[in-house]
Image: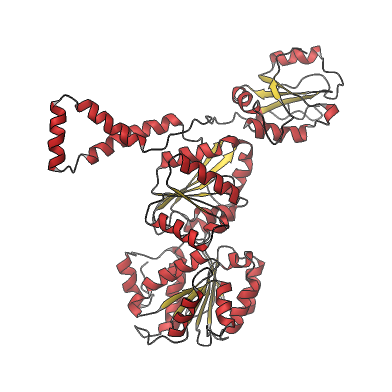
Amino acid sequence: MSFENAHPTLVKALIEKGYAEPTPVQAAILDGKFGVQDLLVSAQTGSGKTVAFGLALAPSLLGEESKFGAPHAPLALVVAPTRELALQVQRELAWLYAPTGARVIACVGGMDVRREAWQLEQGAHIVVGTPGRLCDHLDRGRLKLDSVVGLVLDEADEMLDLGFKDELEHILQATPPDRRTLMFSATVPKGIESLARSYQRNAARVAVAAGEAHQDIEYRAVVIHPRETERVIVNILRFVDAPGALVFCRTRDQVNRLHQELAERGFAAVALSGELGQAERNRALQALRDRRARVCVATDVAARGLDLPDLGLVIHSELPHDPQTMTHRSGRTGRAGKKGLAVVLVAGARQRAAQRMFQEANVEPRWMGPPSADAIRAKDEETLRKTVVELAADVAEEDLAVAKELIAAGEAERLVAALVRHQRGQLPAPEEVTEWRAPPPPPPRPARGQEDAYPLHAPRAARNDLTDADPDFEADAATADGTWFRINVGHAHRADPKWLLPMLCRRGGIQKQHIGGFRVLRHETRVLVHSSVAERFAKSAGRADPADPNIRIVPWFGQG
């Protein structure tokens, strides 16, 4: 499908930008059956919805005309949840409507309010802004909405999540009742439905599936040891080598720590979190746009609305809260027809939760372990060869003259080696990480009435014995398919498999099916760990853990 139903003047801008055909959401908007009807559109970030609502507004704003007249009070108003998204929308609409002579301005928090007031006084055809700043201009009489014929609420669900319900209603009530209202939202919760019923007239529902919007994103689930998160992120950034990468963290403290770690390792990285002022955020974003920085570490709130150039990689540093968060974060890449990669780090004990999330999001990731240091070094060798050859493709005559003198002195191999060493020294060193192995099949379920709840080779003796010596238990342990470990808590410390199991999985970086049996005694507990992961478990679980500083886990060799 082409842009045959789009306004002819806007088609010129699309052709100049290289648009060949509409995205699914743009095609849905251009369906002639909607006319100038109100729309409630559910589409994911990165689906091309800014251009979509720009095209949808054109019939109401321009009619049969090809250009706008002199600007006065705005004809269209676009409301977005964050500064970055509003500024991005303003830039998109500016080029889309450039052939029409439209004046598109932004009114967002954190920017010079006096300059915005002057721009409003000069007149504008389209105003894009954040709820708080728009209400401020409205209350002070600077923003006149009597002439608005088209209103867009972009990412309406996020605006409600951020607490802008009152501001949105204030803006909607200030616009003419016969305006055309377009609501765009990744999800349509009850709050959005209520808003649509109150402020839209017979709105048509347009739904674009998340899979269509994210068809250019490849998902990978990387199973890691929870203590190796930062090292794994280093290796992924080194191995993928995308021109731009965005790493999501849950808290500001995690952002600051990871940003510092990456900077110390030689990555050109910036951080975005809620504690930064607007000037600092602008500097960080500009560094990403002009490629002085390659990696952005951010929280969800700080990264809302970001549209970074050549963002080929998104890393979720831990499992997101829900499928919507995952798809929204991942939607930062794979935009405008470009391919993107979304990597979700999954602690070993959370693989089942991750599988459920991927199923709910209708995503089929490729499960794998983190890139090893050896794999990165092997890739570096190949890249270095290509780089040296490319450097030799365009050499000045004066450089060749010096090279000939050096070669004549018999130093050719050493010179090339020095060049390779120089190039290699510019790369951050890869990290040693734990090798991931596919988990063994789960053990067979116990027969009904069998005493042990976690049997791989269950000991015969009863679990509630009150002595720490048991010859029968030691005989069974010697033949078990796994390794027994001793934990320094027992019945006297109220030890219970219900809380021991998740603790062991977390500390040892294993899964529940790797646990073969428990033996809770008076002063200690013994646990059987499958032989395929026993060595890794011993290394990981044996380290001191701030979360359980008094609990020690050591191998048990059958002595008492």
Lateral position of residue 391 relative to residue 58, left or right:
left
Lateral position of residue 516 relative to residue 261, left or right:
right
Quarter of the rendering occupied by the N terminus: bottom left
Q: Nearer the viewer, residue 14 or 32?
A: 14
Quarter of the rendering occupied by the C terminus: top right
x, y percent for residue 178: 55, 86
Displayed quadrant of residue 498: top right
What residue occupies the far right of the structure in this picture?
Answer: 466
Q: Nearer the viewer, residue 185 or 21?
A: 185
Q: Residue at x 80, y 13 (%)?
A: 472
Displayed quadrant of residue 173: bottom right
Placement of 46 over or under 354, stated as above or below = below
Displayed quadrant of residue 453: top right
Lateral position of residue 398 relative to residue 145, left or right:
left
Q: Residue at x 57, y 83 (%)?
A: 140
Placement of 92 over or under 483, stated as above or below = below
Placement of 483 over or under 421, stated as above or below = above
Q: Nearer the viewer, residue 555 or 19?
A: 555
x, y percent for residue 315: 50, 47
Asked which colour scheme the image uses, the reply is secondary structure
Lateral position of residue 155 relative to residue 18, left or right:
right
Q: Is residue 456 visible?
A: no
